[in-house]
Image (tube, helix red, strand yellow):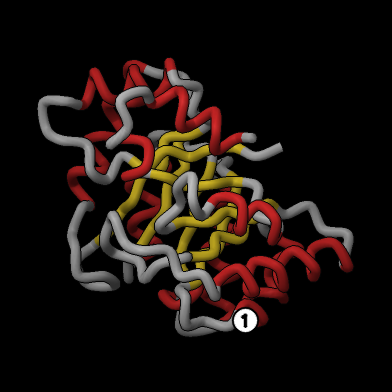
Amino acid sequence: MVEVSSSILSVEKGEEARTFLALEQGKTDYFHIDVMDGKFVEKNTYDKMLEYASYIKRISNLPLDVHFMVQDVKKAIEDFSILEPNIMTFHYEACKTDEEVIEYIDEIKEAHSKVGIAIKPNTNIEKIYKFLPYIHIALIMTVEPGKGGQTFLSDMTEKINKCNEFIKNNDLEVDIEVDGGINLNTQDAVKEAGANILVAGTAILKAVNYGEIIKELKK
């Protein structure tokens, strides 16, 4: 089954309540929270995403899918764990050692969240194989992280396929989430490669009817 995680990165101030409720009515599976610190990536959305995620917790029971694009992963886990996210995902590239990766995996589990590890387009998928038995989600970026509305990088489908093969061959229970440029034109390629959680922002929020796009993405 394919699930949809709706990115709220481009939600305008003053439109929060209307947009979040419309996404819930449109049957999104998750609210995708893009947390950026202005260091790991150029853009800084940290305070805005903390504010939006807090607001969502007050008006909705839908789960939060929090994606940390930050250097200080430890602080981000501490700041967002109070909101009890369903998923907290950090970047492999933000870690200096394998021991640091394991430390963050353990801290997220202690916060009673599912654990995701994300990789940038230029990072080989094999880098995270050793961690897959200990996590729940492999997040494969299909654009360079840090900006919304980018064009999907089609050669990332091979990375998705390789990850899916490794998961199957090792009998692991790990979801493959894809993030970046996902829309009705690119969805089939990532699904066929093995992705089962699709992050979409622009494709949904620019639509007249959120529910129709979400339904198509779930097919």
Disc 1 secondary structure class? helix
Quadrant of the rendered image containing residue 120: bottom left
* Left or right of 169, for residue 123: left
Quadrant of the rendered image containing residue 57: top left
Query: Label 1 neighbourhood size at 10 Å, few (<14), some (14-19), many (20+)?
Result: few
Q: Position of residue 48 (x, y in %)?
A: 19, 43
Q: At 53% across and 47% down in the image, what residue appears?
A: 198
Please state the total of marks drawn on the protein image. 1
Q: At 36% across and 63% down in the image, what residue appears?
A: 151
Q: Nearer the viewer, residue 79 or 15?
A: 15
- Can residue 82 be seen by looking at this rendering? yes
Q: Position of residue 186 (x, y in %)?
A: 51, 54
Quadrant of the rendered image containing residue 135: bottom right
* Left or right of 41, for residue 171: right
- Can residue 136 be seen by looking at this rendering? no
Which residue type does callout 1 highlight?
A: Lys
* Left or right of 44, for residue 205: right
In the image, residue 137 above or below residue 14: below
